[in-house]
Image (tube, rainbow, N blue to C red):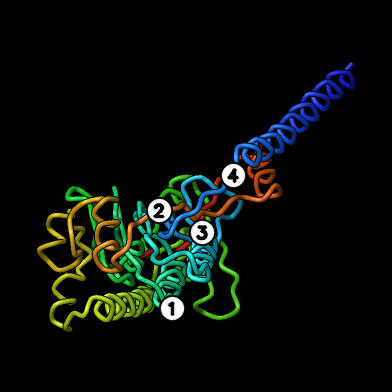
Amino acid sequence: MKKPESNKWTTVIIVLLVLFVLGWFFSKLIALAAGDIETGNVAIVPVAGTIFTSDGGFFEGVALSGDIVEQIEAADANPEIRAIILAIDSPGGAPVASSEVATAISRVNKTTVAWIRESGASGAYWIASATDYIVADPLSITGSIGVFGSYLDFSGLMADFNVTYERLVSGKYKDTGVPFRKLTDEERRLLQKKIDLMHEAFKEAVAKNRGMTRSEIEALATGEFFLGMEAKGAGLVDELGGKQEALGYIERTLKISAEPVLYQHEPTFLEVLSQFAASFNPRVRVSGTQAQLS
């Protein structure tokens, strides 16, 4: 009796998959038929969501450094593009991912501008600082030059339920930061040292990019976030405003009429299919200490 029910669900899944594939192909055909190919001389590269090197199978709310770097390099290689605007709306992200994008910007041979919208904090500010000019909304959140590696400690909760953690490691630091036991004082000092090293790299990058002295960056690199209007007075941004102000800077600097064109990663069919499949298989990931710029 259960077999027909199983066949029924198999048929439903196949039909949904076929409809999904057809919908994807038709959307591409319609875009081509409509001439959905824009031209311009100012590339707009979005940096939206938390910045990582990999999304682990999720797409929404994540800005992948590889995709952003790819668009930056494509815009830099296009002779018709005179300048690049990074449209930033991100709370930050992983140190390596942020550094990768900032490095790509530093290698660009064209005028670069950061346009901070709702948020351009932490790792996103690291990226913004690598551009030639930063425009931020007066009420945007920016700065937040710091690093955190905090995590939840479940050891007390486990004790309440009489659950124990059997420690089997090779190398005394191998399970440092697991949420199933408390840190030793030595481990805490070790992790704090790593976090401080990341913070130092963050500060050095921003100071170099913004032409700040050691004392100036030390005063700002406390992890505090600033509103755009505060960041302007602190020397973290150059102008308050939005897209038009960013384009205006380019027009004044290059003596051109700015024509923006969007440069963003278009997911491949396999990526879209992976996202579709992931929606039927929600996952919860629990990790130990993972440093993020904050």
Q: Position of residue 45 (x, y in %)?
A: 44, 57
Q: Are marks 3 and 1 in contact (CB under 8 Å)?
A: no
Along the horizontal axis of the image, is 27 left or right of 146? right
- Which residue shows up at 14% across the image and 61% down it? 232
Q: CA distance from mark 2 to mark 3?
A: 22 Å
Q: Nearer the viewer, mark 2 or mark 1?
A: 2
Q: Are marks 2 and 3 in contact (CB under 8 Å)?
A: no
Q: Earlier in the sequence, mark 4 or mark 3?
A: 3
- Which residue shows up at 13% across the image and 55% down it? 229
Residue with the mark numbered 2: 260
Depth check, front residue: 236 or 169: 236
Q: Are marks 4 and 2 in contact (CB under 8 Å)?
A: no
- Which residue shows up at 38% across the image and 78% down it? 194
Secondary structure found at label 2: strand
Residue with the mark numbered 3: 64
Depth check, front residue: 101 or 2: 101
Quadrant placement of the N terminus:
top right
- Residue 292 quadrant: bottom left
Q: Characterize the local packing of mark 3: few (<14), some (14-19) or many (20 or more) Cα atoms within 10 angstroms.
A: many
Residue 294 appears in the rendering? no
Q: Residue furthest bottom?
A: 214
Q: Position of residue 75 (x, y in %)?
A: 49, 65
Q: Is residue 49 above or below residue 41?
A: above
Specify the amino acid type for callout 4: Arg
Specify the amino acid type for callout 1: Arg
Q: Residue furthest left?
A: 233
Q: CA distance from mark 2 to mark 1?
A: 21 Å
